[in-house]
Amino acid sequence: MVDPFIYHNPTKVYFGNDALSHLHEELPRWGKNALLIYGGGSIRENGIYDTIVEEIRKAGISAYEISGVKPNPEMPLARQGARFCRERGIDLVIAAGGGSVIDTAKVIAGSALYDGDPWDLVKSRAQISHALPIMAIPTMAATGSEMNSCAVITNPDTHEKLGWTTEALRPRVSFLSPKNTFTVPPAQTAYGSADILSHILEVYLNRAEGFDAVDGFMESMMRSVIRWAPLAMEDGFHEEARTNLLWDSEWAINDLIDRGHSVSWTCHALEHELSAFFPIPHGLGLAILTPAFMEYVLNEETAPRLARFAVRVMGVKEGKNEIKTARKGIRKLRKFFTKSLYLPGRLSEIGLDDALFEDMAAHAMAWKSTDGILHGFYPLTEEDFVA
Ligand code: NZQ
Ligand code: ZN
């Protein structure tokens, strides 16, 4: 029924609009010589950078910085950061930004104590016992990286976008302030919300019997994202919407909901292939792939779960025919992405070249499966991926 598991999530979270005001209390507990990592400059425009600098000053520690992390982050900057940590004796990493920044910080922190190429660690999914401590300051609701032990990064030389999960990468302290997400543009809010929904659906679409309460929690979180995402897009300063989305993003992927089941992360496996080759936002790829995946796997066996999703999350009226009910739910989900979040509904609409799909499918399968089948909600082969 439920596989044996360990649950241990030691990330300390400060939540609330004053969360960052605690940074100076935490910093000296974790290091004396920090490296601040951020992205393309949004934190300089919205004032978060100034607040962090002031907190570092109050903490009385020294700090360097590396900026310019791009969405779908790549190895060269992470390599540079790891080298910098070794050369300057950095003992603490602070990440301020979206998932791309936090993931880059994780790869830097995880490989700073390693003399070889950091990509070796990612590629071999190395289970390391030590990393530099990480403080995370998320500025958008999406990946939940600030409370989990995974980093996703691309090697542009090989077009591989891989996830590296090891406990040492989990941030020690995270500072979650809804107000720090007020300036996230509408499109980015939509991508982040689609990502949160996908994190829940990857777990929820599981035929194994599990925990009733966790199933209900997942349904309620999905309803919450569907309720608040359009409001946050309409009014970026909508505090209730930003607050809910931020907390939803944590619980969607911080090890609570997936315990007790093996999860195949099918849509993520496919999306990581897309964004390894094309510069598309992660959440956008997922918004297109998720309803397509649900439609593809809909059959007598999968219908009960998909029909339950239709009724309890998408508000479809329960009918006698589960396949029909499920189909209505999938249609409503696609409509939510395209009409409420204004996202494209097909890969062709974003101009993706299907010539590479066979290579991508082969790679996704090689990374995720040992027997040529991706086991999960429904067993899929490489040919299914291409389709
Ligand atoms: O670079 P800046 O200037 O900061 O701008 C960013 C970036 O352009 C902007 N942004 C973030 N906060 C903002 C803001 N703009 C204005 N105001 C703010 N407060 O948003 C843009 C996108 O940022 P990014 O970090 O790329 O977005 P996201 O958080 O969606 O991260 C996506 C990456 O995380 C990976 C994805 O594959 C992708 O590479 N994932 C990481 C996971 C994990 N570590 O657990 C799991 C996920 O499934 C996912 O794979
Ligand atoms: Zn994701």
Image (tube, grey):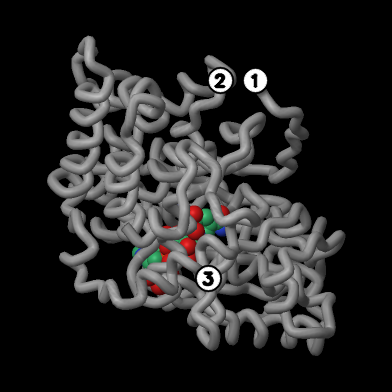
Q: Where is residue 264 in the image (x, y as percent from the top left)?
A: 55, 46
Relative horizontal placement of residue 213, taking residue 172 as reference (left or right): left
Answer yes or no: do the residues labelled 2 and 3 have beta carbons within 8 Å? no
Q: Which residue is drawn at 62% across and 54% down?
A: 371
Give the position of the C terminus as an image quadrant: bottom left
Relative horizontal placement of residue 251, taking residue 294 as reference (left or right): right
Observer-side mark, 3 or 1, equals 1
Label at residue 209: 2
> Could you classify mark 1 by the number of other residues whose Cα lies within 10 Å: few (under 14), some (14-19), or many (20 or more)?
few
Q: What residue type is labelled 1?
A: Met
Considering the numbered disc 1 on the image, is that residue within a helix, a strand or a loop? loop
> Does the numbered disc 3 mark a residue whose Cβ is under 8 Å from ligand 1?
yes
Label at residue 161: 3
Give the position of the N terminus as an image quadrant: top right
Considering the numbered disc 3 on the image, is that residue within a helix, a strand or a loop? strand
Res 91 → quadrant: bottom right
Q: Where is residue 71 in the image (x, y as percent from the top left)?
A: 43, 72
Answer yes or no: do the residues labelled 2 and 1 have beta carbons within 8 Å? yes
Q: Which amino acid does label 2 sit on?
A: Glu
Cα separation between marks 3 and 1? 33 Å
Residue beneath disc 1: 1
Q: Residue furthest right?
A: 129
Q: Which residue is drawn at 76% across and 52% down?
A: 167
Of the two numbered discs 2 and 1 on the same chain, state the one appearing first in sequence.
1
Q: Nearer the viewer, residue 274 or 105?
A: 274
